[in-house]
Every structure is written in structure tokens, then in C-alpha cells.
Image (spheres, rainbow, N blue to C red):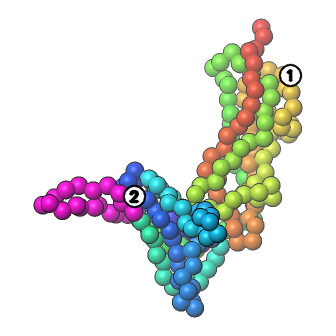
């Protein structure tokens, strides 16, 4: 189940909470909505300047959905405060994936410089707000020096060849009915000048 939420007022609208009503008439917060502890109570976190978001959570029987929003900006008209609210789209859909595994390749390049990779660390991955976290089972990476992915290399080892391009294969697996969603991949690395 996922809820893509696209806010019209990308830089102004905050999302305060998202809850669904189940078949028993109980209101529950979606599991992937970010929360924090205040004392001994778990409370929802405000997502400021929301922009385009996708909330992905396990399959549920949902009869109603409530999205709590806040708009702190207003303008004065006829001696009254006027607040503008709006959404471009709110889509609630059930997504079923036909495969348990998917993969893609990302090229990182130092071409056009006089530098080469001397070491490549394991990629750092961030997930978007509202999506389940990943782990070593659901997201794995492999390192290659050629576009054809002919020979895999280990991360965080010294590279003595003149390598200006590296290719990271990212492999994602489902865990139950949860599918990992990635926001960005950062590649920690060291580089040095090419000696001629």
C-alpha cells in the first residue's frame, strides 16, 4: 500500500500526521509515518515544507484516511487572515510487485579530471520520509570497474589501477510485503592525481 502525496504549496505546507480507519472503526497511524518520543509518549513528527512525498506501508484494510496538515503562512484580506491550502494529488493505491528482486546500476565518474579512484567505500543510502528503512537483506551493493560488470571488486580496498569510472550495482529485495524505496545513494571514496 502506498500513498503518493503531492503538495501544491511545496515550500509552505506541513504534514502533521496520517491515520487510517480499519474495519473495526479504529484510527491508527500508518506504520512508516515518522514519530518521536516526548517523555514516555510517541508522537508524530511534523514534516515541514513537505513537497512531493510517498508513504509506503504494509497492506491494510482501510475504510477512511485522514491527513493532518498545517499552513503557518497567511495574508490579510478584509481585516481577516486568509490561509491557502491545497494538494495537487492524493493517490491511495495498492501496489503489487511481480518480482521479489530488482537491480539497477549507477555510474560514478572522475572523467574530465586528472584524478582517479584510489578507494571506494560501501555506498550510503537514505530512504525517503514515510518509507520503511532498509537493511543488509533488502538492499545490497556490488562494485565494478567496467560497464559490462565483468569482475566484482571489494569495497574499501586500495585501487592501484587508473580507474576513473566505477559502477555500483544496487540489488533490492522485498521483505514480506514491504519493498525498499531509496531516496539517494552517496559514494564515499578517496581519489588521487593520475601520475603521468
Q: Position of residue 132 (x, y in %)?
A: 66, 62
- Residue 151 visible at all: no
Q: Which mark is residue 13?
A: 2
Query: Where does the N terminus fall, quadrant-wise?
Result: bottom right
Q: Residue furthest bottom?
A: 24
Circle 1 packing at 10 Å, graded few (<14), some (14-19), many (20+), is: few
Q: Residue furthest top?
A: 196
Query: Where does the C terminus fall, quadrant-wise?
Result: top right
Which is more toward the observer, 73 or 181? 73
Label 1 SS: loop
Residue 156's image quarter?
A: top right
Circle 2 packing at 10 Å, graded few (<14), some (14-19), many (20+), is: many
**Residue at horizontal 75%, vertical 71%?**
176
Q: Residue furthest left?
A: 78
Label 2 SS: loop
Judge from the rendering whether residue 56 lies leftward or rightward of residue 64; answer left or right: right
Q: Which of the marked residues, 2 or 1, is nearer the chain's N terminus?
A: 2
Relative to 140, is 24 above or below?
Answer: below
**Residue at horizontal 46%, vertical 75%?**
66
Q: Position of residue 51 (x, y in %)?
A: 45, 54
**Residue at horizontal 80%, vertical 24%?**
118
Relative to 146, is 95 above or below?
Answer: below
Relative to 25, is 97 above or below?
Answer: above
Magenta stretch: residue 84 in it? yes
Instruction: State the extent of the magenta-drawn residues as a range.
Output: 70-88
Amino acid at each position: 500500500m502506498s500513498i503518493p502525496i503531492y503538495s501544491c504549496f511545496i515550500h509552505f505546507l506541513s504534514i502533521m500526521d496520517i491515520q487510517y480507519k480499519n474495519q473495526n472503526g479504529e484510527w491508527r497511524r500508518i506504520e512508516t509515518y515518522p514519530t518521536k518520543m516526548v517523555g514516555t509518549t510517541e508522537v508524530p513528527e511534523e514534516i515541514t515544507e513537505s513537497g512531493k512525498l510517498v508513504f509506503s506501508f504494509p497492506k491494510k484494510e482501510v475504510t477512511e484516511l485522514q491527513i493532518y496538515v498545517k499552513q503557518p503562512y497567511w495574508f490579510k484580506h478584509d481585516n481577516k487572515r486568509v490561509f491557502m491550502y491545497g494538494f495537487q494529488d492524493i493517490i491511495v493505491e495498492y501496489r503489487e510487485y511481480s518480482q521479489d528482486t530488482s537491480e539497477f546500476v549507477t555510474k560514478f565518474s572522475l572523467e574530465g579530471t586528472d584524478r582517479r579512484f584510489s578507494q571506494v567505500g560501501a555506498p550510503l543510502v537514505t530512504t525517503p520520509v514515510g518509507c520503511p528503512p532498509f537493511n543488509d537483506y533488502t538492499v545490497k551493493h556490488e562494485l565494478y570497474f567496467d560497464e559490462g560488470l565483468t569482475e566484482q571488486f571489494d569495497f574499501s580496498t586500495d585501487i592501484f589501477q587508473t580507474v576513473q569510472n566505477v559502477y555500483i550495482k544496487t540489488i533490492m529485495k522485498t521483505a514480506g510485503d514491504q519493498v525498499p524505496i531509496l531516496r539517494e545513494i552517496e559514494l564515499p571514496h578517496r581519489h588521487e592525481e593520475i601520475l603521468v
